Image (cartoon, grey):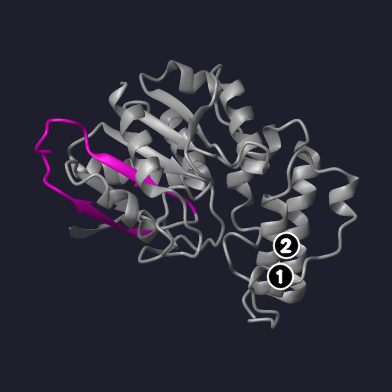
Amino acid sequence: METYTLTTAGADLVYDVRGPLPTADGRPPLFLIGHPMDASGFAALAARFPDRTVVTYDPRGLGRSGRADGRVDYTPEILADDVHAVITKLGAGPVEMFASSGGAVTALALVARHPGDVTTLVAHEPPLITITPDGPAAVRARAGVRDVYEKRGWGAAMAAFVAMTSWEGEFTDAYFAQPVPDPAAFGMPAEDDGSRDDPLLSDRSWAVSDHRPDADAIAAAPTRVVIAVGEESRAVQTGRTSEAAAELLGQRVTVFPSHHGGFLDGEFGYPGKPDAFAARLREVLDAS
């Protein structure tokens, strides 16, 4: 694996390339992106594609990538332009892309803004909460997590986040009537760590989950877009956002094994089914 840094006007973007460029098999590079997950979250998935040239990167302000734009928030448009800059620097585009969570939102913005960058996009569980039928309630639930973070810190907020993202169905009065969960019930520390800058728990990534994809621009692009959902996620929030995104783009969801972190190998305490997940991703990519 080779690691590079691309300096732009607002960030120093660190990216990794596993395999040769140009690619040995003649296929496009496979670019794996997330948000707020950085490149470290894709090690297990990348290892399951030893025959492909795989690219990963750290989004600006996360992992090894610094930012010098004077901002602390994250927007899909800026993140998409960063990914476009990396693809351009590779000199081997267009790429195939697997994008997870907020990275899937970035990728949908990338296809709309830079339609020549990606041949096939597998967008896995984009958390586009405002396009679900209960969008206003989902926004309220998200704000509740932020409020817990501001008052009680990381452990309590992460417990609230897990409770929110594991809630099945729409956010009803029953959800909002629940007490704030005990962090210990989720193995989280109860003490306040003092942080208030977590991109998942603060409001810094709200523009990502507020994003509404430009369906017309995506339809006009040459990219084959696949909205993917984990079989265990269908009833929870990111399953419902995936269904809504697929409907917006005039398609049905493509089901993958496991859950929102189905490609993880347990290194983050959230094991999925990485072998089955990688096999399904290979099948979907090969279908193009």
Q: Position of residue 9 (x, y in %)?
A: 36, 55
List the residue tagged with mark 1.
185
Q: Could you say where residue 97 lies in the image, as x and y percent from the top left?
A: 34, 37
**Label 1 to label 2, Cα distance in Å?**
11 Å
Mark 2, secondary structure of its residue: helix
Disc 2 residue crowd, few under 14, some 14–19, many 20+, Cα 10 Å: many
- Residue drawn at point x = 86 percent, y = 52 percent: 176
Image: 176 above or below 183: above
Magenta stretch containing residue 17, yes or no? yes
Residue 176 visible in this rendered orientation of the protein? yes
Where does the magenta region start and end? Answer: 11-35
> Disc count in the image?
2
> What residue is disc 2 on?
160
Q: Quadrant of residue 148?
A: bottom right
Q: Quadrant of the C terminus?
A: top left
Residue 131 belongs to magenta span: no
Q: Is residue 130 left or right of residue 33?
A: right
x%, y% of residue 201?
64, 62
State the image coordinates of residue 51 (x, y, percent, origin top left).
16, 42
119 over 158 or under it: above or below: above
